[in-house]
Image: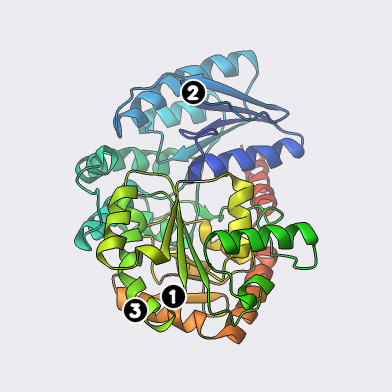
Amino acid sequence: MHIAMLAGEYPPLWGGLGSATYHLCNFLSNMGHEITVITRKLKNGVRPSIDNVNVVEVNWLYAPMTFTRSYGKNALNKIKKINSKKPIDIIHLHCPLIALKEKEIQFLRNEIAPVITSLHGSWLGERDGIIAAKKHKEAAVWKNPNDLAILFTAKYYSKYETAAAKASNICVANSNATKNEFKSRYSLPSNWDCEVIHWGIDENLFCPINHEDENEQSSYEEIRKKYGADDLDGLKGNYNTKTPLILAVGRLAARKGFRFLLKSMPKVLKEIPKAKLVIVGRGGMYKTLKNQAKKLGILNSVIFERGMDFDDLASCYRSADLIVYPSYYEGQGLIPLESMASGIPVVTVNDGPLPEMVDETVGSLFSPGNFEDLSDKILKELKNPDLRKSQSINGRKRVLNESTFTQEKTAIRFNELYNKIITKK
């Protein structure tokens, strides 16, 4: 079938939405489908090539939030031209980074093809995450143009999310939390049709360390030495290391909660003084976070990495002892799944979609807004090597056994849904 993907992010924009769309296209291509991706035009960067996937770029207004509407209108015009040359069987919208009116989506349904809308989260949820970040004095909330735009225009742009939810043939939320959020906060009919399909990860890239493999062990030791987590037990991969390596990954933005994480570290370091925290991410908070670590007296125990490629990141995952994910808001959040697939326990917030993936068998959940509880959960993990060993095994099993926690299984579910919609039509 010919599938049209309307996605505001697509590689080289490797945001969560862009990454999910790319990997979905890759597996759908392997199933024999032809995909046309309509995305925003970029000045720089090389887009990866996939067989049977044609990327079409459209212009957009370079302004926070406003771009979703300009991109949406240009994508709408483009899809009409594409359909006139090669009929489209399914239209897949990826919200919230595309803003279309209800009548525009009805036009697509009536004149071109059935419409399925993926809900990757909501603008109102993003706004609440930023407000929560501000409450806990995270940096850059009032300095970041994107955060400011979300704060002041989320309610306005949520009307386009409501339109997509109402007018599409079916919606697919990336978590039960996202589905429930739309049901409770958006004006939707009682018979609203929405399924839940979690986005999966690459279980072959994110996999546990094999200490018997000479190359893997060499890379593991190199990473541990680089970050100073290199006592003898740490280098051997023993769970009772006195130099545990804690890893946190994500965009350096207020909503991701890195200042909150830094507040939790003095208590951790008081009991485990040789622990190291590595924060990996790009964004505008690098100097702020570094200054905060200095004020807290923990700068020697914190290392900042301004991003890295996927292979190096995967190596960091499997070389760590614990992953911490303190985000204030997520539609789903893939980092916990990447951690679990890598055989590494994860500590994250007991809120939103995160408890759908993480429980005490694979890690720990801390109370929202309580950095003392976050400290306690990190210490609980690091001081219980037998617990982490069992959680490592359980986490990998959960990713492999769940219905949509891998990219291939996610694509299979969407393929089934496409066929279901076409059959109904």
Q: Is residue 77 left or right of residue 31?
A: left
Label 3: which secondary element? helix
In the rendered structure, are the residues bearing label 3 and label 1 in contact, judged by CB atoms less than 8 Å apart? no
Q: Nearer the viewer, residue 242 or 347?
A: 242
Q: Is residue 397 above or below residue 70?
A: below
Amino acid type, mark 1: Leu
Depth-wise, is mark 3 or mark 2 nearer the camera? 3
Any mark on residue 44, and which? 2
Q: Residue at x 57, y 75 (%)?
A: 362
Which quarter of the figure has residue 23?
top right
- Location of residue 134 (image quadrant): bottom left
Q: For mark 3, does the 10 Å Cα neighbourhood hold few (<14), some (14 to 19), or many (20 or more) residues?
A: some
Q: Which residue is mark 3?
A: 267
Question: Dot 1: what SS?
Answer: strand
Colour approach in the figure: rainbow
Q: Which residue is mark 1?
A: 365
* Foreground disc of the pair 1, 2: 2
- Eye-nearest disc, 3 or 1: 3
Q: Is residue 404 visible?
A: no
